[in-house]
Amino acid sequence: MDTHHSDLPMAAMSAELGGIIARFAPSDGDHAVAVPWLTLHRYSQIGDLSCGMSRPSLIIAAQGAKRIIAAGEGYDYDARHFLITSIDLPVMSRITQASVAQPYLCMAMSLDLQLVAALMADMGRPRSESFPIGRPIAVGSLSQRLLDTALRLARLLDHPDEIHVLAPLLEREILFLLLSGEHGRRLGQLAAGETGSSKIARAIDWLKNHYDKPLSIDALSQRLNMSVSSLHHHFKDVTSMSPLQYQKQLRLHEARRMLLGSDGDVGTVALRVGYDSASQFSREYSRLFGAPPLRDILRIRAAVSVR
């Protein structure tokens, strides 16, 4: 199989990538493939805002467009722009360009921060740097070289016997290109051992596993061996939110998922995600999602039924 760099124009590469995604993702939804850290996505229509959790990942769209909203900021990407997320973060998302004839098609590659750290060592990069990394999600211009590497990775799906040898090489190449580009500092600092940002990654893991419990900032800062002021500063730098705001978003996103799955009434769900007051839960839910819980869930179900 040919895995060296292509001289195709970017439009032709995007078209080929879209064709591969369409074959391996034949219906709307998220599709696992033989490459374990790669997921393909296909959606045939513009949808309402949905909530979910971003993971450290690189997303390259071959066709269509999508908007991600995190911490009140919007990020739009399409076939000319990639999206990179560097931490786990509650997000809202919406397909903004799609149709049955030309569905939204993308590939999402999970970013292995341990592999990033090992690659940084191979590149001679220092493991600990103190500069701020900026926002946790960013959009970048898709270069021909990055698109070419993504296309060569997608081509492997037609050659499953070659995946175990060539996919790790292409994964390293993609990470190398990201580390060498404008967003390399973001990845590098999060992968570093004991920087403030890597400690925040540990704080995020703890919050995800204890989002329904009362949050003590003093206890969390002691757990991370950070001062309270340093925790607040670094956490906001990495996530654009305070720890309490992050926990609130985790609770509300999980509550919406439960309600959509008919997993309890509003009062029960409020208690399960950590609220003592159902009225406070409804107020904060309305502020985030634009409508009280029951009205929001009925609207979503009605929209799905119409589709």
Image (cartoon, helix red, strand yellow):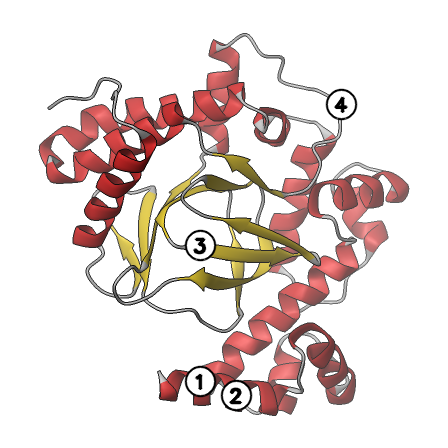
Dots 2 and 4: beta carbons under 8 Å? Answer: no
Residue that label 3 marks: 65
The residue mark sitting in front, 3 or 4, is 3
Q: Which mark is residue 299?
A: 2
Q: Residue at x 69, y 34 (%)?
A: 197
* Quadrant of res 4: top left
> CB of mark 1 within 8 Å of CB of mark 2?
yes
> Label 2's element?
helix
Q: Which mark is residue 85?
A: none
The residue labelled by disc 1 is: 303
> Where does the image place residue 305, in percent across and percent down from the top left?
37, 88
How much space separates mark 1 and mark 2, taking CA atoms?
6 Å
Instruction: Tell me the crowding category of disc 2: few under 14, some 14 to 19, or many 20 or more residues within 10 angstroms, Cα based.
Output: some
Lower sequence index among marks 1 and 3? 3
Please tell me how crowded label 3 is: few (under 14), some (14-19), or many (20+) other residues with Cα within 10 Å: many
Query: Disc 2 vs disc 3: which is toward the camera?
Result: 3
Amino acid carrying mark 4 in the image: Ser
Give the residue type that dot 3 points to. Ala
CA gap between label 3 and label 4 equals 35 Å
Q: Is residue 180 left or right of residue 273?
A: left
